[in-house]
Image: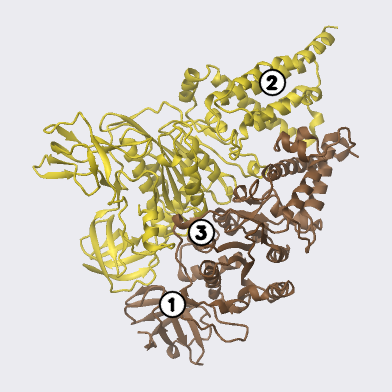
Chain colours: A yellow, B brown
Amino acid sequence: MGKILEINGPLVKLELPSTVIGEQVRVGRLGLVGEVIGRDGDTALAQLYEDTAGLRPGEQAEGLGWPLSVELGPGLLGAIFDGVQRPLHAVWEKSGDRMARGVAVPSLPRDRAWRFVPDPARRPGETLAGGDVLGTVQETESIAHRILVPPLARGELLELAPEGEYTLDQAIGRIRLSDGGIDKLYLFHRWPVRTPRPFRRRDHAVQPLITGQRILDTFYPLLKGGKAAIPGPFGAGKTMLQQQIARWCNAEIVIYVGCGERGNELTDVLEFMPELKDPHTGRPLMERTLLVANTSNMPVVAREASVYVGMTLAEYFRDQGYDVVMVADSTSRWAEALREVAGRLGQMPVEEGYPAYLGSRLAAFYERAGRVETLAGGHGSVTLIGAVSPPGGDFSEPVTSHTKEIIQTFWALSKELADARHYPSVDWLESFSGYVPSAAKWWAENVDPDWETARAQALDLLAESEELQRIVNLVGVEALSSEQRWTLEAAGLIKEGLLQQAATDEIDSFASPEKQYALLAALLEIHRQGMKLVKLGAPARRLIQMPLLAQARRWKSQHKSDDLARLRKKIAAIPAEFEELLREYAQSSTR
Amino acid sequence: MKNIEFRTATSAQGGLVVMSGVPGVASGSRVQLRDHAGRVRSGLVIRAADEAVLVEVFEGTDELDLERTWVRFLDEPFKLPVSRDIMGRVFNGAGVPRDGRPPIVSADRRDVNGEPLNPAARAYPREFIQTGISAIDGMNSLTRGQKLPIFSGGGLPHNRVAAQIVRQAKLLGEDAAEFVVVFAAFGASHADARFFQESFEESGVLNKVVMFLNLADEPVIERLLTPRAALTAAEYLAFDLDYHVLVVMTDMTAYAEALREVAVLRGDVPARKGYPGYLYSDLAEIYERAGRIKNRRGSITMIPVLSMPSDDITHPIPDLSGYITEGQIVLGRELANQGVYPPVSVLPSLSRLMKDGIGKNFTREDHPHVASQLFASYAKALEIRGLAAIIGAEELSDADRRYLQFAEAFETRFIGQGEDEDRSVYETLNLAWDLLSTLPPEALIRVSEEELAKYHKWQAGAEAA
């Protein structure tokens, strides 16, 4: 037992010999919890996850003997936790509307019994290794929770419980470890959040993550197991885009970490998600979703921990063989929490006050994403999507620039697009994706062999129109040739008819890969037909007046993804729309 | 401990006093200092160790004689006494009456720092608040429980806009309970404070206003306490007495500057522009106290006013605020110079919670699409206006000239309105359709075809005179 020497904001100096860096401590009369971040002789420096007001020098302190860990087992799905995995609903019931300090509630409910079905392949006497599946608990209708042997355990299975109802406190089996000791197995186990969970080996990511958002899937794809960043100034629609991804993506588990973000946004997710159906299974989305929430007004040290808590939960589901998407909103707040603590420790700041280890911490964190072969031999993936909130929208600031070097897919949000209410405001010139070749294979096999060409054509058109727009801004549209004007118009058609997507529109909110490609091909076809005419000498003015152009802009919100027959009919009719004009100009040019 | 006076101050500088030989002082505890003239100052323990205790003095350390300063540690955080009697009263930043009337006597004293709301206990803001200002109601709607700041600049009429919102704000429908107002000014001029006071008086709401004033010539450190005291009062009114509370705070820039001043004295490592790294967390502690709670009737809606240093929206104060608040109303100097009041620059303005507070069950079914269309059409019109400035308006096509006229009408008729003009949201939407009717239907792709048929009054062939 030790005591408090000094209190300085969230940092507390303790007289506490023989603690280990990273070890959890319990401090003061309120029993506030924190972790040791430094040692000097008999004194230890700890950062606390809760507000330190009211603590006094001389109050007691004790080391708990383990690092910050999370509980992994049934009860995770549909739950909302704070940055150190306290279940917010249970805390609410226990301590009221406000976050009281020193409340100890187990992360997973202990009073609930789960129906455990042992894996029929398991036999007493066999040798089990970490990550092996003991059985399943059907946690929600869409997700079977596989109960795993803790990753570091290894030994002979002595006994496995029969099918039945068990609480987390009841043992479901016994194992004889290699050192001869006997351990009980439970429906859950603990894992320290700052240590990546082990796996057999890394796999290549091969499948695209379908988000239903056209600018993402069609233009800047992300793979399952990939790493992406969404940087954007405030008001650029970052949160909206992430929520769209969380709602619609074809992962099996979605983990949303609200790190230093707005309270009302989390409430929105909490109230909205249960009403929404998973487009792939038809079940409520909440059944596959898990929230970690440390809002901006909650203590800063727990904010730093929250992304690791989220990542460990993601790895746990990956180890069960699931494809997991983790959205971290926002990694900038996490970096700022690092900076705040570094500042209080008096560490030498480098860029913008950030500590020198910012880049390596970010890289190590993003490296926990990936598609792997699990210890049990299955395949699972963690796709990491990190939001970045660059101050003043300046992408050259430290967090954005470090992140840019680490990730493969970069969805740059633009304030200009958002101001013009072009949503999602993903900038098609600033964004990039290193996964296009892998994604192209999938699209070619599953949707259309021409996907890669069509995508490139559309991007060329957009880039060309940007050049032309610059000319227009200088000398006016009259200076352009008919061909150039038509290019400009066709690019506008792609922006409005394809890239813009209304999250609040029931039909437009999600577009299947088939619908995405159909629209893309259709708009390119309009461009091609028009170009033929222009080359025959038709003035762009006449083309621009065609009612087809206004109609095509509405197709995205008129045709559901699962009912594309009518859309395909309209697309097939495109050449006919141009026929009359074509005849007219073909004659005049031969004359 | 409460009753012992210590005379062990060892150093004092710019509002901070170091005390030695006072063991066991609680971090965050309130302190009373009595100086040689008998004047009592208050302070806060910001760093506690047995050897030395660092105290922040709200009234500053001017004329403090270390040898003749007596310090008492009150062993509790800063608390604000609350009761129904706070309505209609004026306090200073530390909650002491400044209206010449007796102090509030109440056994109910609340820690001004509050405690963070459990995210699971929050209820999502939904109900539309009508402010009577078209640029806000039509395109950046405010909802109950939202925090929507006004981003302004020196010399712009943000105070007049804020006062107009306070006068006109109402809820639609049967549950149209009235608002009470908590007004906090920090670093404000005497003239600004008087303007608000008179504005509340004239509209007869003064007895429903609680004011917390820390004016420009008053202690800087007290500024850090002012918004916290005001929000403690607001939380009491909203969640104990079931009122809908509108909190107006001006000016957050003065607050952040006070925070920087103190941070530098403490020796904190600066992050951007000398502001401490915890500016974001500190602002969030204030802004996040807005909201609604499940199973409680009251609500706190917050309108902080913030002047952007040299109109720079990327300055750390508006930038960090924008990441916490649910949108922003931006006032524009160009519009103000054209004589448009309120000079709301609609393109950079945004209300994040708007989507859930408008439309069929709240305002009118066409509202979301109309708002989106106005943004798109006005953005396009501004593009054309920029072009016209280069190549001359004569060179524009008829269609483009129509957009120029639309922009003109939109700015003067839709954004512009009288300071006493209270437009209902239906008037605002009808006005929007009047303006959109000057553009051809094929140019309006954000509204549905049904809405076009119902509201759009386009006359084909009408001259773009």
Q: Say whether residue B381 is left or right of residue A189.
A: right
| Residue most extreme to the left | A180
- Of labels 3 and 1, earlier in sequence is 1
Mark count: 3
Q: Are marks 2 and 3 on the same chain?
A: no
Q: Residues within 10 Å of mark 3 (few under 14, many from 20)?
A: many
Q: Which residue is label 1 attached to?
A: B55
Query: Tag 2, which secondary structure?
Result: helix
| Residue most extreme to the front | B174
What's the residue type where badge 1 is placed? Val
Q: Pointer 1 indicates a residue of which chain?
A: B
Q: Which residue is label 2 attached to?
A: A526
Inter-mark Cα distance, 2 to 1: 72 Å
Query: Tag 1, which secondary structure?
Result: strand
Is residue A371 something one can see in this rendering?
A: no
Q: Is residue A252 above or below residue B104?
A: above
Image coordinates for residue B265, horizontal then vertical, percent: 49, 71
Q: Say whether residue A466 is left or right of residue A182.
A: right
**Which residue is pictured at 67% across the width and 51% down the height?**
B140
What's the residue type where badge 2 is placed? Ile
Q: Residues within 10 Å of mark 1 (few under 14, many from 20)?
A: many
Image coordinates for residue A132, horizontal then vertical, percent: 23, 34
Q: Say whether residue B36 is left or right of residue A529.
A: left
For discs 3 and 1, the disc positioned in front in the rendered view: 3
For the residue pair A213 and B143, the one nearer the viewer reads as B143
Image coordinates for residue A101, horizontal then vertical, percent: 37, 64
Is residue B353 something one can see in this rendering?
A: yes
What's the residue type where badge 3 is placed? Tyr
Q: Which residue is label 3 attached to?
A: B280
